[in-house]
Amino acid sequence: MTIPKRAASNRRIAGLLSRASQPVLRILGMLAIVGAVTFLCFTGIHMTATATGFFYLLVITIIAVRWGVWEATAASIAALLCFDYFFLPPLETLTIAGARHQEAFLAFLAAALAISQLVARRIPHESEPMDASREMERLYALSRAILLMDAMQPVAKQTAYQIAQIFELPSVLLYDRASSEVLRAGPEDMTGIEEKLRDASLQGTFFQDNASRTVVAAIRLGGEPVGSIALRGAALSDGALHALTNLVAIGLERARGQEAANRAEAARESQELKSTLLDAIAHEFKTPLTSIKAATTALLSGSPSPLLEQRELVTIVDEEADRLARLVNEAIQMARIEGGRMQLNRKIHAAQSLIEAAISSIRPQAEGRKIHIEVPAGLPAISVDAELMGLALRQLMSNALKYSPPTSPVTLRVRVGEGNLVLSVQDRGFGIEEADQRRVFDKFYRASPGRDRAPGAGMGLAITREIVAAHGGEIRVESKRGQGTEFFISLPISQQESVA
């Protein structure tokens, strides 16, 4: 047996022993109270029989209020015997001498039993239903809790916990028919009830055990059982129990509706991603394909041309083919990242080499634009996937080139700060409104100042964020309207020695 199972078994045994010992403890407590009153009245203050009888009746009343009718009846019998033995002549015997004492004995007996019965019946106990106002308050609290439940956590489990807390129940079991899962809540465990739970969820049966104060009821939605619930220690009216099961049914159905909506949204986003990637690929491929077509057309035109010019045309074809290969690879990487299938191939790299590779790959898009590089010597090494981190840097630099005037420079900086290597890309473009800054990393979102001035799919920054997060880093943006934008990537520094 594993330790968790052993611990659960110990808790169940402790719960059973606790419930079994409660009646014994109550009887012992009742006898102790009657004995204390008898000792006090007989040897302490030497009260008369009449005063002692009233004192006994007061104690019986308190026991009836605190514990109930059976305890009060037992206390009445114990007090009656003590009253006869110690206070009615002849003393220290269970016989009664004289008609007057017999009348007193009978009067005490009648009063004690009547008080214990009347008081106990008028005081609500654990085994009796709570009043309507308390039921309504708790049902309202449960409905509010169900509405405010965290959709990211299992709703059935949260519901069982809330029922146990709000109705102060020692044990709650909730069976969800859709998942065939039994959820437990409360300080005590409830065993041997799973079969009744399944029967109730399949056939809509109702089960009640007054001895253990256990109720098993079906949870219905649209007249059909969708699950069942078992409550121990519940004292609910039929109407309150029906309302409770309806609330649980609504909560479960709401959870299923949310799950269906999430699946539909995921499917929609997946389809939108495919469409967006195709649009982006078509746009990005257009420029290198145009250059390749122009170069090959010139080569195949048949007109004689100098060898140097032919070499230049072939070089264009080679460079643009490399660009196409890189675009295809980036599209594949983006699809993998979006599909949650990103795998990091981490290695120790010098920051300088990563920067140089990113600059080299972005040069054809820069088309003569000034790119300032501020990289100090002696930077520490970082453990990254060079291909993915290069993709992230290219996305930031591509954005900076697209969303800034053709005559303005783009600056790439690197610095070390508080255990991180900080890379930043700054442009002198339109800037991003403060309201848009919180959403620029969302999929398909494009900030308003530049969405009509530059082509794009709204996926670049979302992909960059995923890559940085996978490396344990952070990305943020600083921007002012009309003054440009700067993106910062913070990456943990490797424990390896610094690399120049």
Image: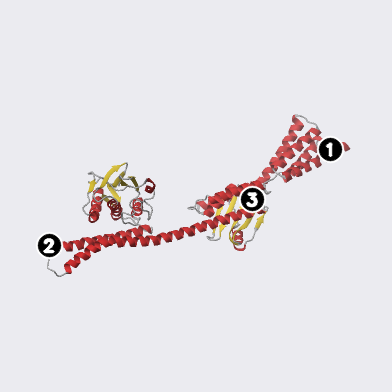
Residue at the extreme right? 99
Is 26 placed above or below 154 here?
above
Residue found farthest to the top: 45
Is 425 or 368 nearer to us in this picture?
368
Q: Which x, y percent locates residue 231?
A: 61, 53
What residue is shown with label 3?
234
Q: Nearer the viewer, residue 62 or 85?
A: 62
Crowding around mark 3 (Cα neighbors within 10 Å: few <14, some 14 to 19, many 20+) is many
Give me the C-alpha separation between circle 1 and circle 2.
135 Å
| Label disc, if present, on residue 104 of the rendered structure | 1
In-image side of 90 versus 166 (left or right): right
Picture coordinates of residue 326, whole percent (x, y): 27, 59
Residue pictured at 33% horizontal, 62% vertical = 278
Q: Is residue 169 visible?
A: no
- Amino acid at pointer 2: Leu
Numbered disc 2: secondary structure: helix
Q: If you read the primary sequence from the N terminus, does the residue marked by circle 3 or circle 2 appear first?
A: 3
Query: Which residue bears the numbered disc 2?
Result: 308
